[in-house]
Image (cartoon, rainbow, N blue to C red):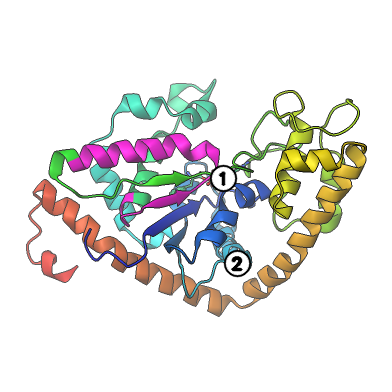
């Protein structure tokens, strides 16, 4: 593909629609950190996606900055990777329109996330943005000739749609896009809610006891883990279907200590839920305390944070331009003198 960098491209993003949780960390961000030196990486704060739900403007601004600081505090190197806000690169919105005209109502209506988020709602009350959300996600990915997209299991279907759109466009206009692959981890692809462990842990959950935010205090973390729903069976076993609460705690501990949940379960065979919960809380606090110190230092130096995001946006705009131009050209848009400028 044009201007191919020497390493393959990796792209991923998170919506700044609530507090970043350990679900997003374990399912996605942890792998961004691990893969960042093998790939040429772009890590986006997908602010345009976040407005499918109404946001309070001042809090939204602050949350976008806070997400950037959290990416860095978790170990993303802003010198090596491109960290940026989606709205700073207009090509995302432009490519979305071009892809919209090749996407079908039927395939978008089949998206389980759309169905889940709109269940029971009247059609008059369902935002078009929510429906079109996966096309914007496809544009994010395809703009950069992305090879790998590390995400949690809930994004698998959106990745399949992205691949379908890439193949469809390549078939219609010749090779425009790299067809990307999802990277979904073996452990932690779906961290569950603490109170309702058959549902996914989500940053937009109304019940704060269901999730643990990365910027939560140790006391709150300990309390939430202690109250996590488990079951009355004696001993610890890893059985996600029949013991989802215990399995979820084992998954969280396994992800933080790099051990397989089933193997961990065996080491707790003679112990109860209380011992497991205690160790999960300890592991979370040991991981989050130094992270939080780095996070607060980054948030206290706004100039430096703004500079990282400005530089990231510049790099991303530069990286996105050739692909967008190629799509316009392939579709026959007359672009006059602009052709030379971009
Ligand atoms: P979002 O913001 O809901 O979640 C961000 C990432 O975290 C993962 N994740 C989880 N993984 C495991 N267990 C959980 N409980 C959990 N909760 C969240 C998600 O799978 C995701 O990888 N549509 C995306 C954002 C997006 C994007 C993109 C991602 C927009 N454009 C381009 C990749 C590439 C979303 O809503 O993720």
Tell us which disc is closer to us: 1 or 2: 1
Q: Is mark 1 within 8 Å of ligand 1?
A: no
Crowd class of label 2 (few under 14; some 14 to 19; many from 20; radius 10 Å): some
Ligand 1 neighbours mark 2 (CB distance < 8 Å)? no
**In terms of depth relative to the viewer, which is nearer, 47 or 24?**
24
> Residue 238, image x and y in percent?
76, 33
Element at label 2: loop
Q: Is residue 176 shown to the viewer in this render? A: yes
Distance from the alpha carbon under mark 1 to that under mark 2: 18 Å
Give percent across and percent down for residue 43: 47, 60
Q: Assign a secondary structure to mark 1.
A: loop
Point 21% across, 50% down: residue: 176
Would you say 201 lies left or right of 329 here? right
Q: Where does the magenta region start and end?
A: 142-170
What residue did someone put label 1 on?
185
Q: Main secondary structure of the magenta part?
A: helix
Residue bearing the label numbered 2 = 75
The residue closer to the viewer here, 55 or 329, is: 329
Q: Is residue 250 above or below residue 338?
A: above
The question of residue 163 being in magenta is answered with yes
């Amino acid at each position: 593909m044009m201007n191919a960098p020497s390493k393959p491209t990796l792209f991923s993003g998170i919506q700044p629609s609530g507090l970043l949780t350990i679900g997003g960390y374990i399912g996605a961000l942890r792998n961004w950190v691990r893969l960042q030196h093998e790939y040429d990486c772009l890590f986006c704060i997908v602010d345009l996606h976040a407005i499918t739900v109404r946001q309070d403007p001042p809090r939204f601004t602050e949350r976008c900055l806070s997400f950037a600081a959290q990416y860095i505090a978790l170990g993303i190197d802003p010198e090596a990777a491109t960290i940026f806000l989606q709205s700073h690169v207009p090509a995302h919105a432009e490519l979305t329109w071009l892809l919209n005209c090749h996407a079908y109502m039927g395939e978008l209506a089949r998206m389980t996330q759309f169905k889940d988020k709109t269940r029971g709602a009247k059609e008059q009350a369902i935002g078009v943005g929510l429906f079109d959300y996966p096309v914007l996600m496809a544009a994010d990915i395809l703009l950069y000739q992305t090879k790998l997209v590390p995400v949690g299991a809930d994004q698998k279907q959106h990745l399949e749609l992205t691949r379908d759109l890439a193949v469809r466009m390549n078939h219609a206009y010749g090779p425009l896009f790299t067809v990307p692959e999802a990277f979904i981890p073996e452990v932690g692809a779906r961290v569950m809610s603490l109170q309702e462990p058959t549902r996914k842990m989500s940053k937009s959950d109304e019940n704060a006891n269901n999730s643990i935010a990365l910027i939560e205090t140790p006391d709150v973390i300990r309390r939430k883990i202690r109250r996590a729903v488990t079951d009355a069976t004696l001993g610890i076993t890893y059985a996600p279907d029949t013991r989802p609460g215990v399995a979820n705690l084992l998954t969280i501990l396994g992800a933080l200590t790099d051990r397989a949940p089933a193997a961990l379960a065996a080491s707790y065979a003679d112990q109860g839920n209380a011992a497991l919960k205690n160790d999960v809380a300890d592991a979370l606090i040991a991981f989050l305390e130094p992270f939080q110190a780095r996070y607060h230092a980054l948030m206290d130096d706004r100039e430096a944070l703004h500079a990282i995001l400005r530089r990231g946006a510049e790099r991303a705009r530069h990286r996105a331009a050739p692909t967008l131009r190629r799509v316009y050209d392939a579709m026959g848009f007359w672009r006059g003198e602009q052709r030379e400028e971009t």
